[in-house]
Amino acid sequence: MVRVAFAALIFATVAGAPAFADDPIPVTLQNHRFTPNVIHVKANESFAIHLFNKDATADEFDSTSLKVEKVVSGNSDGMVRIRPLAPGKYPFMGEYHSATAQGVVIAQ
Amino acid sequence: MLATLVIVFREVIEAGLIVGIVLAATQGVSRRALWVSYGVGAGVLGACLVAAFAGELASLFEGSGQEIFNATILLLAVCMLTWHNVWMAGHGREMAREMKSVGAAVAAGQKSLLALAIVVGVAVLREGSEVVLFLYGIASQGGTSQSAMLTGGVLGVIAGAGVSALMFLGLLQIPAGKLFSVTAWLITLLAAGMAAQAVLFLQQGGYLQFLQSTVWDTSWLLSQDSIAGRLLHTLIGYSDAPNGLQLIAYAATIAIIMGLTRWEHARHPRGSQIPNPV
């Protein structure tokens, strides 16, 4: 019964196309640094970051405060969808190169 | 070296805690070590495959392949944990009795071991693929010396396994009569936390775009970035800022497991299924 319910959930979610936020914010990761590394967004509205990884190796866009983790392969791109945020500062990092790959989302 | 140690430690401990709970939950079942090692082995293999094909995986489902994959394997683990707990409700007493007779093979117990081996495999796969990608990145970069990286990685594995082993040994201090009810609760909360995490992945993938606002924020009390916060996140799904749908998934998973457990328990009334030797 549980399995049927979960299978139904998976099918229901897979069947529909994923929702895309309007105008994702482009962010580039190069030499293990984000550009821009300060991102201003409106509070209480969902948004998406379109991350272009120009490095040769993968990195993980990771933020516990934004509640996202997404691996983006080397020389590839990925969409990072972020839920509506209360006003505040939300740091994020490239987890595999956290010494340099640091940034912050400011919601206001 | 330290960065490598920290990241490997973090991933190993997250998988290790789950392995520890599974080992405690199957205390006394014959051949469990074999099944758990199958799970770990399959997980490591899967982690390498996922890391190797990360780009291809991500491009599926209009760029949401990674999120769908993570959510699917988490929900698979939730089903297996549920199945184990429900199965234990029906056969736990029988098993506890057979544990006492030396070398008794619990034939039916093998089925539950398969479910838990899948859970172990999923845990190792998820955390392992991150370790593989991370180490591969450093290795191909060449900046850090390879030996320092290897040292950090090995120390991370040892430290992570050590902490997991301590938790497992701690669980074994629980008297045998209560061990299974403690592990049943741990497994229920583990499953609930995984269900909530699966919801987060689906939302990140662009699905289930409702009830997304944060319901409460306890990051001032216990940040999810802290070690305790991370451990609790792995063990019971602690989130310092859960959203509405995550909370519903968490509560629904607990309710479903408890409901099915009671139903199964009622189907196996004391003494009717199992002749009492005393």
Image (tube, coloured by chain):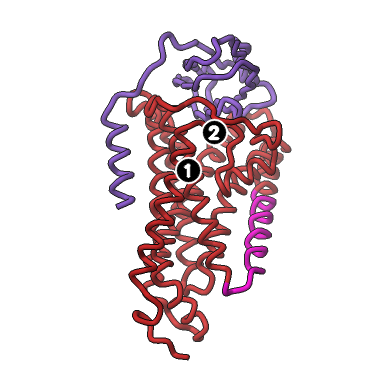
- The residue under label 2 is B242
Tell me the chain of label 2.
B
Q: Which mark is residue B110?
A: none
Please give left or right for residue B264 compared with residue B250 in the image.
left
The colour one sees for chain A in the rendered image is purple
Residue nearest the observer in this picture, B14 or A40: A40
Task: Identify the residue at image location x=43%, y=28%.
Answer: B203
The magenta stretch is B157-177
Residue nearest the observer in this picture, B98 or B165: B98
Image quarter of the C terminus of chain A:
top right
Task: Identify the residue at image location x=54%, y=38%.
Answer: B130
Q: Residue A37: x, y in percent? A: 62, 13
Report if residue B47 is visible in the image: no
Q: Residue B204: x, y in percent? A: 45, 27
Looking at the picture, which amino acid does disc 2 mark?
A: Pro
The reply to whether discs 1 and 2 touch (Cβ–Cβ < 8 Å) is yes
Q: Residue A42: x, y in percent? A: 54, 10
Q: Which chain is red?
A: B
Looking at the picture, which amino acid does disc 1 mark?
A: Tyr
Residue nearest the observer in this picture, B100 or B221: B221
Closer to the N terminus: mark 1 or mark 2?
A: 2
How many residues crowd mark 1 within 10 Å: few (<14), some (14–19), many (20+)? many
Real-space CA distance between mark 1 and mark 2, rounded to the nearest whole angstrom: 10 Å
Question: Element at badge 2?
Answer: loop
How many residues crowd mark 2 within 10 Å: few (<14), some (14–19), many (20+)? many
Question: Element at badge 1?
Answer: helix
- The residue under label 1 is B250
